[in-house]
Amino acid sequence: MTDPRFIAHALALAARGLGRTWPNPAVGCVIERDGIVLGRARTADGGRPHAEPQALAQAGAAARGATAHVTLEPCAHHGGTPPCADALIAAGLARVVVALRDPDPRVDGGGIARLRAAGVEVVEGVMADAAARLQQGFLTLVRHGRPMVTLKLAQTLDGRIATASGESQWITGPAARAHVHAERACHDAILIGAGTARADDPRLTVRGMGAAHARGPQPLRIVISRHLRLPVEAALTSGGPPVWMLHSDSAPQLQRDALMAKGVTLIPCAIDAVGQIDLVDALAQLGQRGLTRIYCEGGGTLAASLLSAGLVDRLDCYTAGLLIGAEGTPALGAMGVGPLAEAPRLHLRDVLRLGPDVLHRWERA
Ligand code: AOF
Ligand code: ZN
C-alpha cells in the first residue's frame, strides 16, 4: 500500500510550515501517479496560498487521473482563496487520500462531500494519528479556541534551573540549545513570564538556523505581566519580531504609553481568583488573534500555573547531568497539588539524546 508513504511525504512537507502559516494549519499535498510525484507543496508562509493549488500548478495537465495525498481535508469554502476541493475536481484528479478531516466549521466534511459528489474517490484516515499530532495547534484552536501549548524546561538532574546565586548559563549543552532554537522556529510565538523577562533580559529570537530560515516569519514574543513590569529598554523591545504583552487593567498608564511607543502590542486580560492573569482567558485572547502553537519557556511560576490549569499539551524537558541540590531554584513553582491522584500526569512520547543531555517529550493524557 503506497498511500501511507505519500501521506508521510506530505506530512514531512507540512512540518516545514509549522510556525509559519498561522492562523491557518500547515498542510502538505503530494500529487502522484503510478508512484511518480507530479507536484508537492505545503501551505505558504502566512497561510496562503493553500497547499493544493501550488501542487496542482506544478502537476499541470498531468494531474488528470492522478492521486492527491493531503494531510488535511481540502477546504470547501470561499475564504482568502477559492475552495481547494473545487480546484482538485477541476483538475480531474481521480483519487484524493486525506489523513484527517478539517474540523473548521466552514469545511468539516464539506470538502470530502464535494469531491465524492463529483465522482472523485476519497480515502480518509490514512496516518490520522501522525496528522493529528502535526496539526495539533490548528486542531486545538478550532476545537478549544486556544493555541496548543508546548512547555519547555531545561533543568538539572534534580529539577533545578539556577544555583542559589542565580547562575543558570549554561545548564544544558550546545546540542540541546540548538534543538530549542529549532523548536522555537516551529511555533507561532514564544511565551514567558515577566519575572523571567526581567531576570534574563532575553531576545527570544531564533538563531543559528541558517539563512533560509532567517528570511521567513519569526515567532512572535509574548510576555505575561500583570503590571507591565518590563524595562522599556529591554532586549525584547530593542528590535526583532513583534512583542505582545498580556496584562491586567491595573497596569499603570505611563508604562502602557512607554511600551506602546516601543511598538509593543498590549492585550488586557481577565484576573483569576488569586489575582493573577487568568491563563484560560489569556490563551483565548491569543486564540482570537489566530495563534495556533505557543512555546512557553518559563519561568517556574508561569510553568507551574499552566500545568495546574491543565493547559500544557506537550512538555519538552531537557535534562543535564548536573546536580545543584535544594538551594537551587526549582524548575517549577508551587502547584498547590493535593492528593497524588489529582496531580497532573503526563505520558512519555519520546526520548532523545542530545550530546550529554537528554530530552524527554511528554504529552497530555
Ligand atoms: C486547505 N489547504 O493548505 C490549508 C487549509 O482563510 P482561508 O481561505 O485561507 O482558509 C483558511 C482555512 O482553510 C483554515 O481554517 C482551514 O480550515 C483550511 N486550511 N485548507 O485546503 C491548505 N491551509
Ligand atoms: Zn484550501
Image: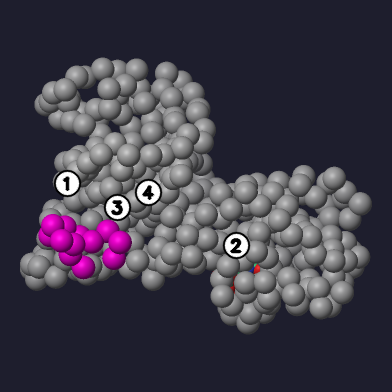
At label 4, which amino acid type do we have? Val
Q: Quick one: label 2 or label 4, which is nearer the N terminus?
A: 2
Image quarter of residue 200: top left
Q: Residue at x 50, y 27 (%)?
A: 352
Q: Which mark is residue 195?
A: 1
Sort mark 3 into few (<14), some (14-19) or many (20+) by Cα contacts within 10 Å: few
Instruction: Choose mark 1 or mark 2, whichever is in front.
Output: 1
Alpha-carbon span between mark 3 and mark 4: 8 Å
Q: Position of residue 309 (x, y in %)?
A: 29, 52
Q: Which mark is residue 312?
A: 4
Q: Which mark is residue 309?
A: 3
Q: Position of residue 175 (x, y in %)?
A: 44, 27
Q: Is residue 172 left or right of residue 8?
A: left
Q: Position of residue 102 (x, y in %)?
A: 61, 66
Above or below for 158 versus 53: above
Instruction: Please say whether residue 271 is visible from this viewpoint.
Output: yes
Q: Which mark is residue 268?
A: none
Q: Quick one: label 1 or label 2, which is nearer the N terminus?
A: 2
Q: Which residues are magenta?
A: 270-281
Image quarter of residue 54: bottom right
Alpha-carbon span between mark 1 and mark 2: 36 Å
Q: Quick one: label 3 or label 2, which is nearer the N terminus?
A: 2
Residue pointed to by mark 2 = 44
Image quarter of residue 274: bottom left
Under tag 1, what secondary structure? Answer: helix
Instruction: Choose mark 3 or mark 4, whichever is in front.
Output: 3
Under tag 4, what secondary structure? Answer: loop
Q: Residue at x 30, y 29 (%)?
A: 155
Q: Is residue 21 left or right of residue 50?
A: left
Q: Position of residue 276 (x, y in %)?
A: 16, 57
